[in-house]
């Protein structure tokens, strides 16, 4: 009996390795066989495409329009300058900073905020975040004088990179020491309610660099001789986050630029801080955002925040499938039938491969199209997974914008080299074929082959009619929350594209059926703060992979999870992103003003524990402990609450 189990185990492992071979995720602390390899896109001109190499759909041509990628439009901070005093105030001291990524992070975690460069306006709020630095001549002497007095008046002052010596006593330390040699930040205070939810080792310690790397680590500011035990310390022993009480007020000095840290993750530069590439809990950016949220809630008695999952559920779980092998199209029907029977929906990213090359046969055939129509008819979302599925997509040129089938003929020579290959070609042609052949009405979601991420992706997706991307892994992005992509992976202009980072995949060892419990446990961790949990299962086989999915579905349902497609979550998230909330005091009540330009189903707002709903007008609203749920939020709304305060 034991020998039979061993044989079965070997067979399962071989099956997994066959699917794993050329798509192995290699990153971060894992051995990287791709190290030193050069990605090449060659354009030698046309070459003969014989019938045995090219699968042609007779009479199909397109798209016939020309895609124009607009120039980058810088986002101005004044876009975020309006709102009531109940919001977090960001006092911006330098516009040449990563404030855009800070904004995206605050929106992801649900903190309402305003940005101002006027210290007088900022100090009308109860919680003020000074960003990106409290130092030098970034503020006037009068501003520093008022900031010094702010905690004494009961305010909460959060300073990033406090390097003005005249403010040291306010934040409770002797000197600020800039350094790029720190490799981690550790939360030490077990008595602080701000840190009570940080219980996992990945929440307690945030990596800032790699001790084996020759590159400088993330720039930090260590604070010496803090008067009180700091909330966090760096590995060099210096205080990373100080806490100095001033009667009812408090001042916190952060020695890490949270905007810069978020920017590195969001823009695919977080590899030095990621402890693994995928399949593990990596909440580094989320921890910093959660801490800001705790500081805001503690300092603003009327602090209301926006939940990240509809109907106050704990977790969004998305099952996705990269359909990129000749067996995957037919097997996709089996997965879709199961998902419909389980009451969930999946997203199927389709490779429209019509050329035989180094990668594979021309697998996007009429038979494949027929199977994909069945998948969509079962209620599943169809997304694009490129035409060529190449690692070299990361270095592909943008293209001309007039690429079309059948003239667009990318040819993969090996894993690192492709001919006649552009970003716009991959986006335009794959989307066109999926729509033109009647597989789906509209393609709005995209995932590249090998998760290759070109610098031009955000603007190219927007220009070609996509809305949502699932290109990064949660570990490399340092977050288990969605976020808006920036133009050109920069910090100047925002795009309209939202990124939904991938959490879990099916190809790395150990064997899948041994990973079900770990997968469920990972979901529990992400569900502590309403994260998203995106699972990738390649449907090249059924059997153990399908059983793996079933095990995850059953286990994660116990956590009151929501199971949308990427498109469904994207539509909900993009509508949530536009929601504005403010609190005003009205005749002894708290009036919550809500503006939802787009309809949001199950909008959840986290409210102070002492609040009790008194008047909801015509809205269908439920109150749960510490939260209200608006069944359908749209337009301008008002809710009145009583409070024991």
Image (cartoon, rainbow, N blue to C red):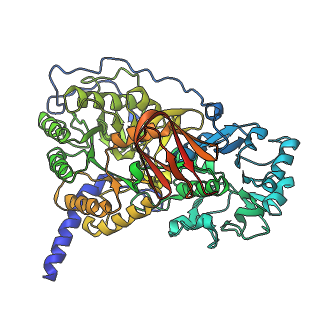
Q: From the viewer's perspective, is residue 583 above or below residue 8?
A: above
Q: Is residue 457 visible?
A: no
Foreground pick, 148 / 385: 148
Image quadrant holding the N terminus, namely bottom left
Residue 384 at what x, y percent from top left? 30, 37
Image quadrant holding the C terminus, namely bottom right
Q: Residue furthest top?
A: 65
Q: Quadrant of residue 99?
A: top right
Residue at 21% x, 64% y: name it.
14
Q: Is residue 328 visible?
A: yes
Residue at 80% x, 63% y: name it.
173
101 relative to 529 in the view: left or right: right
626 relative to 178 in the view: left or right: left
Q: From the viewer's perspective, is residue 386 above or below residue 245?
A: above
Q: Residue furthest bottom?
A: 2
Residue 330 at what x, y percent from top left? 14, 45
């Amino acid at each position: 009996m034991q020998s039979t189990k061993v044989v079965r185990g070997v067979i399962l492992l071989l099956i997994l390795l066959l699917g794993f071979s050329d798509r192995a995720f290699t990153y971060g602390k894992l051995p990287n066989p791709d190290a030193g390899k050069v990605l090449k896109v060659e354009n030698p001109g046309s070459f003969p495409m014989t019938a045995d190499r090219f699968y042609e759909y007779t009479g199909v041509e397109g798209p016939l329009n020309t895609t124009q990628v607009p120039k980058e439009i810088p986002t101005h901070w004044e876009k975020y300058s309006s709102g009531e005093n109940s919001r977090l105030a960001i006092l911006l001291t330098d516009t040449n900073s990563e404030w855009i990524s800070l904004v995206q992070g605050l929106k992801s975690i649900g903190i309402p905020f305003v940005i101002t460069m006027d210290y007088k306006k900022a100090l009308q709020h109860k919680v003020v975040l000074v960003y990106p630095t409290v130092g030098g001549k970034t503020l006037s002497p009068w501003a520093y004088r008022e900031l010094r007095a702010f905690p004494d008046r009961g305010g909460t002052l959060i300073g990033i990179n406090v390097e003005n010596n005249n403010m040291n006593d306010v934040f409770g330390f002797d000197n600020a020491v800039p350094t790029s040699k720190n490799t981690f930040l550790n939360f030490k205070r077990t008595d602080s309610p701000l840190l009570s939810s940080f219980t996992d080792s990945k929440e307690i310690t945030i990596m800032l660099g790699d001790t084996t790397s020759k590159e400088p680590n993330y720039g930090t500011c260590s604070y010496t001789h803090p008067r009180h035990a700091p909330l966090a310390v760096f590995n060099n022993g210096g205080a990373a986050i100080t806490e100095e009480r001033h009667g009812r007020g408090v001042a916190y000095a952060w020695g890490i630029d949270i905007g810069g840290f978020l920017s590195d993750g969001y823009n695919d530069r977080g590899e030095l801080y990621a402890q693994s590439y995928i399949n593990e809990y990596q909440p580094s950016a989320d921890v910093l955002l959660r801490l800001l949220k705790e500081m805001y809630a503690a300092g603003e008695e009327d602090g209301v925040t926006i939940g990240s999952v509809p109907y106050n559920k704990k977790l969004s779980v998305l099952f996705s499938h990269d359909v990129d092998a000749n067996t995957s199209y037919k097997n996709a029907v089996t997965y879709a039938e199961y998902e419909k029977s389980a009451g969930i929906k999946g997203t199927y990213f389709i490779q429209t491969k019509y050329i035989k090359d180094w990668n594979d046969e021309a697998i996007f055939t009429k038979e494949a199209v027929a199977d994909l129509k069945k998948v969509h008819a079962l209620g599943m979302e169809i997304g694009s997974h490129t035409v060529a599925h190449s690692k070299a997509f990361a270095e592909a040129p943008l293209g001309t914008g007039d690429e079309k089938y059948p003239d667009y003929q990318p040819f993969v020579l090996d894993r690192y080299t492709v001919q006649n290959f552009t970003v716009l070609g991959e986006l335009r042609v794959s989307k066109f074929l999926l729509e033109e052949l009647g597989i789906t009405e509209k393609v709005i979601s995209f995932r590249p082959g090998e998760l290759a991420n070109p610098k031009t992706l955000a603007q190219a997706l927007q220009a070609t009619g996509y809305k949502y991307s699932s290109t990064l892994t949660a570990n490399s992005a340092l977050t288990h929350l969605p976020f808006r992509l920036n133009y050109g992976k920069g910090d100047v202009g925002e795009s309209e594209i939202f990124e939904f980072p991938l959490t879990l995949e099916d190809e790395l060892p150990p064997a899948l059926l041994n990973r079900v419990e770990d997968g469920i446990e990972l979901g529990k961790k992400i569900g502590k703060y309403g994260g998203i949990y995106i699972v990738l299962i390649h449907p090249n086989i059924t059997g153990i992979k399908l059983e793996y999915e079933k095990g995850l579905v059953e286990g994660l349902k116990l956590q009151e999870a929501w199971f949308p497609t990427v498109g469904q979550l994207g539509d909900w998230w993009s509508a949530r992103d536009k929601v504005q909330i403010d609190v005003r005091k009205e005749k002894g009540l708290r009036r919550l003003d809500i503006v939802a330009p787009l309809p949001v189903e199950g909008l959840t707002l986290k409210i102070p524990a002492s609040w009790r709903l008194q008047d909801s007008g015509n809205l269908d609203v439920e109150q749960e402990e510490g939260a209200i749920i608006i069944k359908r939020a749209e337009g301008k709304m008002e809710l009145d609450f009583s409070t024991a305060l």
